Image (spheres, helix red, strand yellow):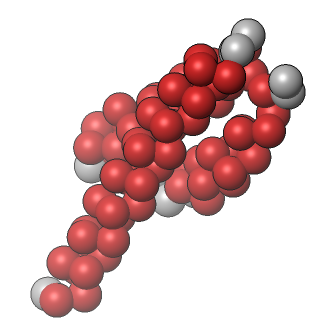
């Protein structure tokens, strides 16, 4: 089993979001937990010794990635509506 099998999508999503979320932004704390969860999931997948652990980490990482993308979309839509 290669831990990198499940990392590519998470890493690509994280890389895309990192550019949007700067620690100096006023709302960074809204995002930090999700970003940390994604980073932790990538590490856990890379260190996984079995499919159950890799799958669990991937699920948590993708859930956080999807929540962060949804939060971004809501904020973008709110800004457009102003």
Which quarter of the figure has residue 46?
Answer: top right
Query: In this figure, what is the number of numbered marks?
Result: 0
Q: Residue 30's x, y, as percent?
A: 26, 43
Residue for point 68% across, 51% down: 9
Q: Is residue 12 above or below residue 30?
A: below
Q: Residue 14's x, y, as percent?
A: 59, 48
3 or 51: which is nearer to us?
Answer: 51
Q: In which quadrant will I find the N terminus? A: top right
**Residue 25 is at least partly visible in this image:** no
Q: Is residue 31 left or right of residue 78?
A: right
**Residue 29 is at least partly visible in this image:** yes
Residue for point 63% across, 45% down: 10
Q: Residue 81's x, y, as percent?
A: 16, 89
Residue for point 41% across, 42% down: 64
Of all residues, the one furthest to the top in this rendering is 49
Residue for point 72% across, 39% down: 7
Of all residues, the one furthest to the right in this rendering is 2
Q: Is residue 56 left or right of residue 69?
A: right
Q: In which quadrant will I find the C terminus? A: bottom left
């Amino acid at each position: 089993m290669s831990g990198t099998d499940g990392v590519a999508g998470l890493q690509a999503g994280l890389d895309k979001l990192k550019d949007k979320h700067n620690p100096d932004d006023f709302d960074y704390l809204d995002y930090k937990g999700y970003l940390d969860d994604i980073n932790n999931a990538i590490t856990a997948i890379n260190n996984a010794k079995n499919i159950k652990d890799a799958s669990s980490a991937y699920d948590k990482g993708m859930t956080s990635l999807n929540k962060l993308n949804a939060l971004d979309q809501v904020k973008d839509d709110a800004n457009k509506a102003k």
